[in-house]
Amino acid sequence: GQQLNQSPQSMFIQEGEDVSMNCTSSSIFNTWLWYKQDPGEGPVLLIALYKAGELTSNGRLTAQFGITRKDSFLNISASIPSDVGIYFCAGEGGTSYGKLTFGQGTILTVHP
Amino acid sequence: SAVISQKPSRDICQRGTSLTIQCQVDSQVTMMFWYRQQPGQSLTLIATANQGSEATYESGFVIDKFPISRPNLTFSTLTVSNMSPEDSSIYLCSVAQGPEAFFGQGTRLTVV
């Protein structure tokens, strides 16, 4: 089956620093989605990417859909304490909207 | 985005018993999805809940263990049957609106 490799597994940064995380796959995906999950909550959609090469921003977040359709990255600029959480990439492989393959997650800790 | 409500939000259950989790969406959707998130892990798709037909299960998940109902376009249930401690996880309901997928807050299940 399809698998996503997400890195890094965890990050410890100072407030104000920029953050970058990425996902790679051996399979092509039609849609890449980035989520944030806080403790005790379900994942919240941050950014959705629909076509190869697409670069999309949402406030301090920027994500790109790789040209090969097998990778994506998420950048967070000027991190703040509320950015703490687990970030997941997810890919939709064309069989059905909503059937997602998730990366392993990146645990982000921001020190004030 | 769709508003998705799950009940219960958490439960502690005895091994050998069953728990039914409810998922209510504030709009009609064609497909609903059930995911499992084991402790400290990523999300794995259990099945797709289709209205008017049997659910479609992913590899490693079977109907006898995770029976699903989908009586209408806004509601679904997932039952975790004959529970064991290995079933302790967060169970999440999801819906797709186009290529974007949204999640409920999850049901945190602990089996003792």
Image: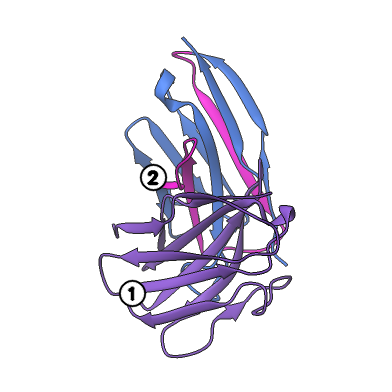
Chain colours: A blue, B purple
Chain of the residue under label 1: B
Q: Which amino acid, mark 2?
A: Thr
Q: Residue at label 2?
A: A56
The verdict on residue A42 being magenta is yes
Image coordinates of residue A108 in percent, x first then y, are 56, 27
Q: Seen in the image, is B100 located left or right of residue B88?
A: left
Q: Is residue B71 above or below residue A17?
A: below
Using a 10 Å C-alpha cutoff, classify the residue at mark 1 as few (fewer than 14 neighbours), some (14 to 19) or many (20 or more): some
Q: CA distance from mark 1 to mark 2?
A: 27 Å
The residue nearer to you, when weighing B18 against A53, is: B18
Q: Secondary structure at mark 2?
A: strand
Are the two marked residues, 1 and 2, in contact with CB atoms closer than 8 angstroms?
no
| Mark 1 or mark 2, whichever is nearer to me | 1
Residue at 46 percent across and 13 percent down: it is: A15
Residue at 46 percent across and 61 percent down: it is: B93
Q: Is residue A35 above or below residue A2?
A: above
Image coordinates of residue A58 in percent, x first then y, are 34, 39
Image coordinates of residue A23 in percent, x first then y, are 62, 46
The residue most toward the bottom is B52
Q: Which amino acid, mark 1?
A: Val
Q: Seen in the image, is A76 located left or right of residue B91?
A: left
Q: Residue at label 1?
A: B29
Can residue A84 be seen by looking at this rendering?
yes
Residue A87 is tagged as none
Q: Secondary structure at mark 1?
A: loop
Range of magenta residues: A15-44
Q: Seen in the image, is B71 located left or right of residue B57?
A: left
